[in-house]
Amino acid sequence: MSDIVLELKGVERVYRQAEERLDVLKGVDMALHKGELVALVGPSGAGKSTLLHVAGLLEYPDAGDVLIDGASCAKLSDDARTGLRRTKIGFIYQFHHLLPEFSALENVMIPQMVDGVRRKQARASATALIESVGLTARATHRPAKLSGGEQQRVAIARALANSPAVLLADEPTGNLDTHTADGVFGLLETLVRQSGLGGLVATHNLDLANRMDRILRLENGTLHEGAAAT
């Protein structure tokens, strides 16, 4: 059985505006393995967020295929893609996007309840996740009462709520100071290793990139393997 949790095969993504055509992704191939943390780097505007959106089934590729846990997504309906996103993919963004009217614990419960998990079970699971990110004492606080680092820790717990196979992170520490970013990334790294999922992290922080297993560089629409992390 393959340990590949995410695979892109010949993925192309084109944007058109009036007479202009912008080829953002040009036949991208990549594979992400269980327990692996991979950095996605490249200049601003290179298409890192686009690649994550396509990999996370938020956008359709114009050509090629995305495979999640070995299953082709090329011909899936919108409903089927939504189901896969909910159960197989966790997302973390630069800005946490927590729901402001709910507590930290409730923000982690909600994805599970949307997936049909009963409230009691969702609360128990969310409580364990909040504990795993070191926020038990802050579980009942709403986002406005949490620091930036604490909010991002809640966002990590929320991304793991439905036990995904793939974790996609877009500049997850980009809005944090250096010390807080280091702590948040260390937590993210630990959880990826423990959970055995595959993590793809877009970042401009090369210090963090060099702490990952591999570096992929996106430039001019193509993806290239970088130096192995040391």
Image (tube, grey):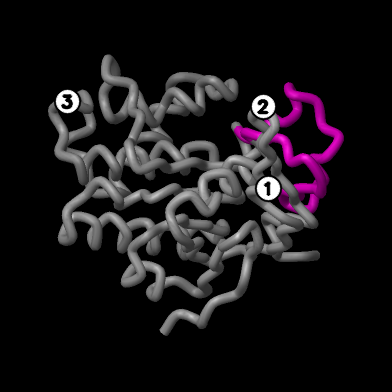
Tag 1 residue = 23
Q: Nearer the viewer, residue 222 or 115?
A: 222
Tag 3 residue = 144
Q: Is residue 100 left or right of residue 200?
A: left
> Image quadrant for the N terminus?
bottom right
Disc 2 secondary structure class = loop
Which quadrant of the figure has residue 221? bottom right
Disc 1 secondary structure class = strand
Q: Is residue 32 left or right of residue 154?
A: right
Q: Position of residue 74 (x, y in %)?
A: 83, 40
Q: Is residue 83 left or right of residue 204?
A: right
Q: Nearer the viewer, residue 122 or 145?
A: 145
The tag earlier along the polypeptide, 2 or 3, is: 2
Q: Position of residue 223 (x, y in %)?
A: 63, 65
Which residue type carries mark 1? Asp
Q: Is residue 100 above or below residue 177?
A: above
Q: Residues within 10 Å of mark 2 (few under 14, many from 20)?
A: few
C-alpha separation, residue under disc 2 versus residue under disc 3:
42 Å
**Badge number at residue 18:** 2
